Image: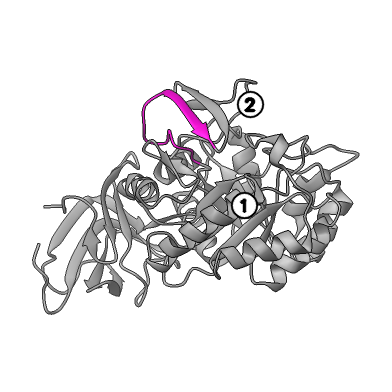
Amino acid sequence: MPDRPDGLLLAAGRVVTPARTFAPGWLQVDGTRIGAVGSGEPDRPPDVELPAATVVPGLVDTHVHGGGGASFDGGDPDAAARVVATHRAHGTTTMLASLVTDTPDGLVASARRLAALVADGLVSGIHLEGPWLSERYAGAHDPALLATPSAELVDRLVEACGGHLRMATIAPELPGGVDAVRRLAAAGVVAAIGHTDATYDQARAALDAGAAVGTHLFNAMRALHHREPGPVAALLEHPDAYVELIADGVHVHPAMVGLAAAAKPQHTVLVTDAMAAAAAADGDYRLGRLDVTVRDGVARLASGAIAGSTATMASAVRFAVRRAGLSLEDAVRAATASPAALHGLARVGQLRPGHDADLVVLDDDLDVLHVMRRGSWVESPPR
């Protein structure tokens, strides 16, 4: 569709903005940015008219390891491009590249290669999910590669990311854990509490030291208990802490997704924790150094432990609305504006003038019809 001098005008049955949902609504795309958003009928005939569709911001996934049969491990540019293309086709226009635990040298090498891809604009940052994790709650991380946090290793990995380390997951009960949280926060990195056997008091100490989010709440952490509330209660009660939720129907019961989202409506972040089998066929895969078998869309280690998900952000939004009872607005915010705010991702996550023209067109079942990134349709444009 050719560009117009006054911008591409799109009208839809619903347009979800930060303040409200316009039904009907419209937005104008000027080059790579959103020029205007409004309610009702636009003042000229639209270039794209979607009366039965809902337009939401491009989805933001800040915890994703792979998809389409590829993964970010190792930092291979071709594999990373395949992961990004796979998720982008399903509505994710912004993502962080998550790395599982590896040797220090392996993580440094992967981080340096991914840092170049951040600089090129393929991904928006790096997330280190390890090596500073609890052996008891290692999940799909090789226990033999876990390490206690030291100032030297923290600094080495931060340096390897070249200013692009957005988040690092840490079990704060480890020796030096709270000091590492403090060191990461001072470096401008989001310190996340996860894969942890922390007590309530240890989790609170980490939050007081600057931790800002819980990595996939409920999963791979000490469970909520009425006499030892653990990290779950500490994260849910803290006024400023965000919580990640894997809304795939496997990791967390829909009632718990709804419970957490109701407790933290402005601080809930939907993530996929997707591995290579996301948007791909069942079969045998690798996650870091571990073998993973995917059957009926569920990824597991030989031990039976869940090994990431095969979800996309669009399917997470749909699950949150259809199964967990979130409003469309709350689910969309948790998949767009909230992760962008947590990670300081500018000009994404909202349909707002001046922001990147990233948007997703959904049908009545919340399935993806079309995706636009920075003013260009990812695949064939709507007619």
Measuring 69% from the left and 66% from the top, which residue is drawn there? 155
- Tell whether position 285 is magenta: yes
Spot occupied by residue 96 in the image (x, y as percentages of width and height):
49, 56
Q: Residue furthest right?
A: 227
Does 212 appear above or below 270?
below
Q: Secondary structure at mark 1?
A: helix
Measuring 66% from the left and 63% from the top, which residue is drawn there? 156
Q: Contact (CB < 8 A) between labels 2 and 1?
A: no
Res 349 visible: no
Spot occupied by residue 181 in the image (x, y as percentages of width and height):
75, 62
Along the viewing direction, whichever of 346 and 107 lies nearer the viewer: 107
Q: Quarter of the image holding residue 315?
A: top left
Q: Answer with mark 2 or mark 1, whichever residue precedes in sequence.
A: 1
Q: Which residue is mark 2?
A: 305
Q: CA distance from mark 2 to mark 1?
A: 27 Å
In-image side of 68 versus 206 (left or right): left
Spot occupied by residue 67 in the image (x, y as percentages of width and height):
41, 40
Disc 1 residue type (three-letter): Asp
What span is in magenta?
274-287
Disc 2 residue type (three-letter): Ala
Disc 1 crowd rating (10 Å Cα; few below 14, some 14-19, many 20+) is few
Q: Residue furthest front?
A: 105
Along the viewing direction, whichever of 118 and 156 lies nearer the viewer: 156
Does 127 appear above or below 195?
below
Q: Which mark is residue 334?
A: none
Q: Which residue is mark 1?
A: 105
- Tell whether position 262 is magenta: no
Measuring 32% from the left and 59% from the top, which residue is drawn there? 359
